[in-house]
Image (cartoon, coloured by chain):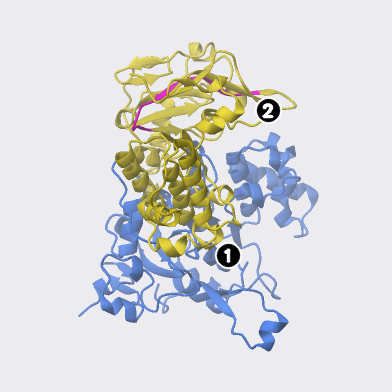
Chain colours: A yellow, B blue
């Protein structure tokens, strides 16, 4: 099966004055048409680096290592020059960020910002808009469940709430009709009730437009409620990748298992939580399993070499104990 | 909650208003009325010694302001807060008692001075207490041990620490003055998921060791379930539901609590249920129930008058659905 986005063997380093940080190591992921793939990981896992690499928005000190390949609809993104990448961004790949207040222009009315997005699309596809643009803005805003669209579009971003602004970003995405939406922690800054609204909206948009979504998050619960497949990243490597239901109900990597077990599900009177010991450290990333230092099942061989990705049922697991069944 | 028997930490009808917009000489000359945000609007709560009260709510509901009022970091505009019978005063007032009530702030990266060493940072609250140098050092290393950090961290700068270590340092800083009450403002929301359980376990451990009273502020029902002896659900400056976690989280009575719990993402992959709308602005509050514009059960009566907190099965609920008679 060929996907809309195919990433093969992607490795990204960041050059810092004192050392080189291996942010991503040999990541291979495919996103199929109309699929929601969640990238789950904590800070330092490389989840944001992956999102930025696919959108070709990596900072200047990032180095993509030889052998990596990112192809979007069969086009090799690595070979494209800047003007060509601009043609892909927006109508091809659209990225939304965690901090919406930094993504929207504070000095422009909502209407103008959405019209800007509509203009990008109509210029590229040469479609003559029959409707007046303002009517189109209103109808797009309505489709992202903004009531009172005619009033809201005359406002500035600071006059709206975080949830409304995130929906304006989604409206701009819908205006450009991208085939791939990359969302980097889009609901982390929002309240739970607003987060639920955005999650449901994203699912509806996917069902209506067959848009593919890469959803980057640190929250397993959010990943569970939105995604078809989940990729768990740790130390810049894919540790577990599989259908969301399988990854969550039958985790095959000790890290995934640890994450699920550390979510509080009981009262303190019923005993302490099963916490993962220690903390992530860049020192652990190298020629061993990045999780070995914190893993309760770590053996000698885990510290000697990086485990390979093995297939168990529908899931891929990077662990020497890959066939193991764990009790939750 | 009743005012006849006072709890160890007692909050009575606490009110905090923030004025919005600057008052200029022109606005004064024009005799413009000042506008206020009612961040905390008449909250009454009691916490027994050694217990944890969790204040559950979304951003803007006033939970952090309530926490700051408890430790005296904000000045009350009405009502009274007392600890063991003594009134808690605003920190800048004369005779304010410090040290017995402490606070751990939400984001340790911004609440700890990045240029200070861990030991200086932890020792700061007791540095003006007239203790000798060796006494302070002994206390710092004892507290550091209590929060599960090795003594080699003492010389490090706080900016060199990881998120979890920073949070442990912030907890140590609150613990060193031997407080009786600690207000924990979202203690795990800025640290990684894999560290959250460690910190929660640590907090429970220290609580039973030192017989501490906690007021824990969170938006996460899971954290609330684990930490709470009592839960108060807050919406736009008011307590809408109060009770034991087994009741409030398992059978929520107030429509807002129900909506809040239904919208929290669950691991079984079921879609969250969303309620419509956004919280109304605190400046122009609805005259009746504050949740009425978003409530699926709203009745005409809800628009007229605010529902009082009434007792229902060991729980307090502010909703007309449960009104007697």
> What residue did someone put label 2 on?
A61
Q: Is residue B88 left or right of residue B276?
A: right
- Asked whether the viewer can see residue B212, the reply is no
Q: Residue at x 72, y 82 (%)?
A: B25
Check the residue under mark 2 and report the chain it is in: A
Magenta residue check for A197: no
Other-residue count near label 1 (Cα within 10 Å), few / some / many at <14 / 14–19 / ≥20: many
Instruction: Tell us which disc is closer to us: 1 or 2.
Output: 2
Give the residue at x 64% y 32%: A59
Q: How many residues crowd around disc 2 within 10 Å: few (fewer than 14), some, or many (20 or more)?
A: few
Q: Disc 2 on helix, strand or loop?
A: loop
Q: Is residue A197 above or below residue A298?
A: below
A43 or B30: which is nearer to us?
Answer: B30
What is the distance, in whole Å, between disc 1 and disc 2 at their CAs?
42 Å
From this view, report whether residue B240 is shown above or below residue A6: below
Residue A209 appears anywhere in the view? yes
Q: Is residue A93 left or right of residue B272?
A: right
Residue at x 30%, y 41% (from the top left corner):
A208
Both labels 1 and 2 in a single chain: no
The N terminus of chain B is located in which quarter? bottom left
- Identify the chain of the residue marked 1, using the numbered disc in the image: B
Q: Give B222 or A131, whichever is nearer the viewer.
A: A131
Residue A217 appears at what percent x and percent y?
Answer: 46, 38
- Which stretch is magenta? A21-36
Q: Position of residue B295 (x, y in %)?
A: 31, 66
Q: Which residue is mark 1?
A: B68
Q: Main secondary structure of the magenta part?
A: strand
Give coordinates of residue A80: x percent, y percent: 56, 23
The quarter holding residue A221 reads: top left
Quadrant the C terminus of chain B occupies: bottom left
């Amino acid at each position: 099966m060929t996907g809309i986005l195919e990433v093969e063997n992607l490795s990204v380093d960041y050059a810092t004055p004192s050392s080189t940080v291996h942010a991503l190591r040999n990541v291979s992921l495919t996103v199929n048409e109309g699929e929601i793939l969640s990238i789950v990981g904590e800070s330092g896992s490389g989840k944001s680096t992956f999102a930025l690499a696919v959108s070709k928005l990596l900072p200047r000190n990032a180095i993509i290592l030889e052998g990596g390949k990112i192809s979007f609809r069969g086009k090799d993104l690595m070979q494209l020059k800047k003007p060509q990448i601009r043609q892909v961004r927006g109508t091809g790949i659209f990225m939304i960020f965690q901090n919406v207040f930094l993504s929207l222009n504070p000095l422009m009315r909502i209407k103008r910002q959405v019209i800007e997005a509509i203009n990008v699309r109509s210029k590229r596809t040469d479609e003559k808009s029959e409707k007046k643009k303002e009517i189109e803005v209103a109808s797009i805003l309505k489709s992202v469940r903004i009531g009172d669209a005619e009033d809201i579009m005359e406002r500035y971003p600071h006059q709206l709430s975080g949830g409304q602004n995130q929906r304006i970003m989604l409206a701009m995405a819908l205006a450009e009709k991208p085939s791939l939406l990359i969302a980097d922690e889009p609901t982390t800054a929002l309240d739970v009730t607003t987060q639920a609204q955005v999650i449901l909206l994203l699912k509806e948009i996917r069902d209506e437009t067959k848009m593919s979504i890469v959803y980057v998050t640190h929250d397993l619960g959010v990943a569970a409620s939105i995604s078809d497949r989940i990729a768990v990243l740790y130390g810049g490597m894919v540790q577990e990748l599989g259908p969301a239901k399988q990854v969550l109900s039958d985790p095959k990597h000790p890290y995934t298992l640890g994450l699920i077990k550390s979510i509080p599900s009981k009262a303190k009177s019923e005993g302490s939580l099963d916490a993962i010991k220690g903390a992530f450290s860049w020192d652990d990333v190298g020629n061993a399993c990045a999780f070995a230092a914190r893993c309760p099942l770590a053996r000698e061989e885990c510290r000697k070499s990086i485990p390979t990705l093995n297939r168990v049922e529908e899931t891929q697991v990077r662990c020497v104990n890959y066939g193991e069944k764990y009790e939750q | 909650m009743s005012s006849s028997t006072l709890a160890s930490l007692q909050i009575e009808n606490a009110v905090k208003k923030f004025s919005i917009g600057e008052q200029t000489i022109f606005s004064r000359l024009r005799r413009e009325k000042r506008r206020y945000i009612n961040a905390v609007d008449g909250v009454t709560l009691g916490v027994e010694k050694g217990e944890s009260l969790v204040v559950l709510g979304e951003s803007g509901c006033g939970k952090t302001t309530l926490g700051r009022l408890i430790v005296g970091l904000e000045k009350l505009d009405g009502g009274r807060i007392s600890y063991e019978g003594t009134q808690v005063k605003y920190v800048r007032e004369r005779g304010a008692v410090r040290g017995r009530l402490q606070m751990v702030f939400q984001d340790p990266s911004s609440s700890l001075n990045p240029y200070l060493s861990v030991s200086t940072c932890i020792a700061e609250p007791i540095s003006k207490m007239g203790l000798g140098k060796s006494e302070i050092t002994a206390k710092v290393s004892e507290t550091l041990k209590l929060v599960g950090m090795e003594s080699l961290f003492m010389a490090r700068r706080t900016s060199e620490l990881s998120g979890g270590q920073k949070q442990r340092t912030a907890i140590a800083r609150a613990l060193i003055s031997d407080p009786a009450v600690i207000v924990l403002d979202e203690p795990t929301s800025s640290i990684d998921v894999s560290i959250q359980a460690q910190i929660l376990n640590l907090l429970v451990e220290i609580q039973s060791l030192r017989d501490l009273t906690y007021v824990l502020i969170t938006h996460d029902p899971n954290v609330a379930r684990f930490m709470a002896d009592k839960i108060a659900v807050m919406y736009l400056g008011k307590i809408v539901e109060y009770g034991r976690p087994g009741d409030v989280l398992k059978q929520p009575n107030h429509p807002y609590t129900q909506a809040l719990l239904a919208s929290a993402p669950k691991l079984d992959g079921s879609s969250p249920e969303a309620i419509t709308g956004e919280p109304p602005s605190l400046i122009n509050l609805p005259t009746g129930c504050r949740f009425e514009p978003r409530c699926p059960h709203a009745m005409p009566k809800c628009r007229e008058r605010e529902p009082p907190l009434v007792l229902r099965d060991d729980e307090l609920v502010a909703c007309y659905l449960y009104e007697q008679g």
